[in-house]
Each structure stands twice: as structure tokens, then as C-alpha cells.
């Protein structure tokens, strides 16, 4: 008993000396300040303000950053001028530990539908970061508005407490997918941890395990077979970030760019949500659009 108390006292002294106690207290306070329901409220509030084209409804911090499709904009510019009624489709990723919230959703715009990826950073009940991707018909090869009308049952399911993965484990599973994409067709290739029957959706279009009317024949294949056949060989996965990890639902958000060597190759800006249970990737939903070669994300990869 004395030894255990001594060790704990020593560790506490180390934490105090290094300032780690302050960091832990700050993290705990941030978590207590805005839980999952609170974060969800910020997402819903943003989308309501967007639908009404009224950014004054948003509780933004004195200093905040807003990007749309990799470009820094003034709040109220871009999609704020054209967005209309939200669709029912809305998959959430909520991270109370880091004050992060995201959603994959869609809204009416003019006579069509625009898919929206939204990421918010919340501190002291104020929005400090707004990152968005807006994709319309013609912005990227794959776009299926009919696939943006219903939420994912898989992403909505909570994971039993005893079966939840750590933040590091969830991030590692998503990163293993990006590593596999980048190394396919090379001696360094290591298969991603796909679960059986995994479905990947890109801008609403299912691109794996399609059973009828595939856009391409390779969409009928499982994701592991697609990578083993190296359909995407030569892809460089850059600017990797994993800003939101939702341990309650077993989901993680990956933000990356896909690039290729060559001046004529576009940059693909991607927000990709992964569902992970039992150490396997169960479903992947991505919002993606083509940008000019060399375009950036508007954010630091270290975030």
C-alpha cells in the first residue's frame, strides 16, 4: 500500500512539474463544458442558420476561421448565399474530449442538391473553427443525390462500452486504410482491416460490393479486392488529419488529399468517415471533390 501511494505521489509530482495536470484538467473541463448532445446542437444550429442564410445566428468566437473547399472565406460567403432546405440525411461525428463535431449531410440548392461536409471546433461554447466541403453535380466523377436522402444505420449505432476502441486504435484503423491506398501495387502494400461486406460511399454513390446496376464493374468488388488489383495505384495520400474521434459510436474522421505526380493531375480533397468495430472497418462514407493540381486544404496537417 505504501509503495502504491508513493508511486502515485511521484507520478503526480511529475505531472505537476511538466504541466500535464493543467492539460488534463483543461481537457476534462472542455469535455464537461460541451458533451455529445451539446456538440450535436452546435451542428444542428449551424445547419439551421445556413438554411436561413443568416450567419448572425452563430455563436462564433472573437477569433475564428472558416474554409469552404480549401479556401479561407468570410463567414456568410460561398454556400451561405445559395443553400436552402436541409435533407433528412445527416451523419454525425461527435468528440466531446476535443470539442469537435462534424456531419455529412445535404441541402437543396437552386434546382439540385449539394452535399455538405461540416466540421466545427467548439471552445467555451463558441465556434472557433468551421471547415466545409460543398460538392455539386459535376464537381467530381461520383455524385448520387438519391444516395443522400437517408442516414446510415451503421454510423448511428453506439458501441457497447466494453467493446469500444481507444482513440488511438480508431485512428490507426483509418490510417491503415490510407496506407493501403497509397501502397497498393507495391511491395510495401499491407491490406486494410476491412470487415466483411463493407460498403464505401463516395458523394452518395456506393463504390464497393454493389449488387445491381454498378457505374463501373469494379464497384461490384469488395474493397480488399479493389486494392489487391491496384485500381488506384500511384495515389499519394497527403495532408492527413484525424481531428474527430467518436469512441461512443466507433467512428473517426479522416481529412486528406489524394494527389498524383504530374502537372495535369487534379488534387482530390476528401473528408472520410470510418465506422470501426471489432478492429475492422465496417462502413466508409466520403465527401470529395476535385481541385486544381497542388491545391491545399486550408488547414495545417498537424491539427
Image (cartoon, helix red, strand yellow):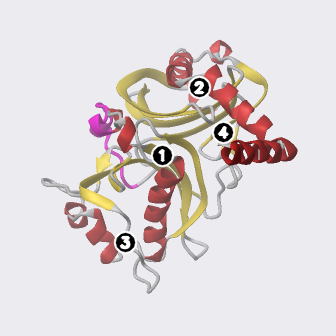
- Image quadrant containing the N terminus: top right
Camera-side residue: 293 or 237?
237
Question: In the image, residue 47 lies at what x, y percent?
Answer: 51, 22
Circle 4: element type: strand
Question: In the image, residue 235 lies at what x, y percent?
Answer: 49, 71
Q: Measured along the vertical axis of the image, is residue 197 above or below residue 103? A: below
Q: Measured along the vertical axis of the image, is residue 291 above or below residue 11? A: below
**Residue at mark 3:** 191
Earlier in the chain: of badge 2 and badge 4, it is 4
Residue at (70% x, 54% y) in the render: 302
Q: Which residues are magenta?
A: 141-154
Earlier in the chain: of badge 3 and badge 2, it is 2
Horizontal arrangement in the rendering, residue 67 relative to residue 255 (left or right): right
Question: In the image, residue 201 lies at what x, y percent?
Answer: 33, 49
Circle 3: element type: loop
290 falls in the magenta region: no
Q: Which mark is residue 80?
A: 2
Q: Could you tell me how far apart the alpha carbons at marks 3 and 2 are, in whole angstroms?
A: 41 Å
Q: Which mark is residue 30?
A: none
Q: Could you tell me how far apart the alpha carbons at marks 2 and 4 are, in whole angstroms?
A: 12 Å
Horizontal arrangement in the rendering, residue 162 relative to residue 242 (left or right): left
Earlier in the chain: of badge 1 and badge 2, it is 2
Earlier in the chain: of badge 4 and badge 1, it is 4
Q: Which dot, 3 or 2, sits closer to the camera?
A: 3
Circle 1: element type: strand
Q: Is residue 201 visible?
A: no
Amino acid at each position: 500500500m505504501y509503495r502504491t501511494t508513493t508511486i502515485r505521489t511521484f507520478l503526480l509530482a511529475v505531472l505537476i512539474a511538466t504541466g500535464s495536470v493543467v492539460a488534463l484538467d483543461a481537457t476534462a473541463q472542455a469535455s464537461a463544458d460541451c458533451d455529445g448532445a451539446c456538440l450535436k446542437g452546435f451542428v444542428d444550429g449551424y445547419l439551421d442558420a445556413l438554411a436561413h442564410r443568416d450567419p448572425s445566428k452563430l455563436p462564433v468566437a472573437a477569433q475564428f476561421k472558416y474554409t469552404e473547399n480549401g479556401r479561407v472565406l468570410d463567414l456568410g460567403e460561398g454556400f451561405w448565399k445559395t443553400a436552402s432546405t436541409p435533407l433528412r440525411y445527416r451523419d454525425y461525428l461527435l468528440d466531446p474530449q476535443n470539442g469537435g463535431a462534424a456531419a455529412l449531410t445535404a441541402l437543396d440548392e437552386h434546382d439540385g442538391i449539394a452535399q455538405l461536409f461540416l466540421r466545427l471546433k467548439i471552445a467555451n461554447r463558441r465556434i472557433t473553427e468551421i471547415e466545409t466541403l460543398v460538392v455539386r453535380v459535376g464537381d467530381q466523377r461520383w455524385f448520387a443525390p438519391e444516395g443522400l436522402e437517408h442516414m446510415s444505420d451503421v454510423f448511428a449505432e453506439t458501441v457497447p462500452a466494453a467493446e469500444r476502441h481507444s482513440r488511438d486504435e480508431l485512428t490507426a484503423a483509418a490510417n491503415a486504410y490510407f496506407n493501403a491506398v497509397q501502397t497498393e501495387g507495391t511491395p510495401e502494400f499491407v491490406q486494410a482491416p476491412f470487415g466483411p461486406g463493407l460498403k464505401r460511399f463516395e458523394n452518395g454513390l456506393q463504390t464497393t460490393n454493389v449488387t445491381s446496376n454498378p457505374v463501373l464493374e469494379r464497384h461490384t468488388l469488395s474493397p480488399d479486392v479493389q486494392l489487391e488489383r491496384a485500381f488506384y495505384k500511384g495515389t499519394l495520400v497527403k495532408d492527413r488529419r484525424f481531428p474527430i474521434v467518436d469512441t461512443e459510436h466507433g467512428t473517426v474522421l479522416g481529412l486528406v488529399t489524394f494527389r498524383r505526380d504530374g502537372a495535369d493531375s487534379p488534387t482530390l480533397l476528401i473528408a472520410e468517415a470510418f465506422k470501426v468495430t471489432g478492429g475492422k472497418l465496417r462502413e466508409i462514407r466520403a465527401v470529395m471533390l476535385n481541385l486544381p493540381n497542388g491545391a491545399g486544404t486550408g488547414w495545417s496537417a498537424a491539427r
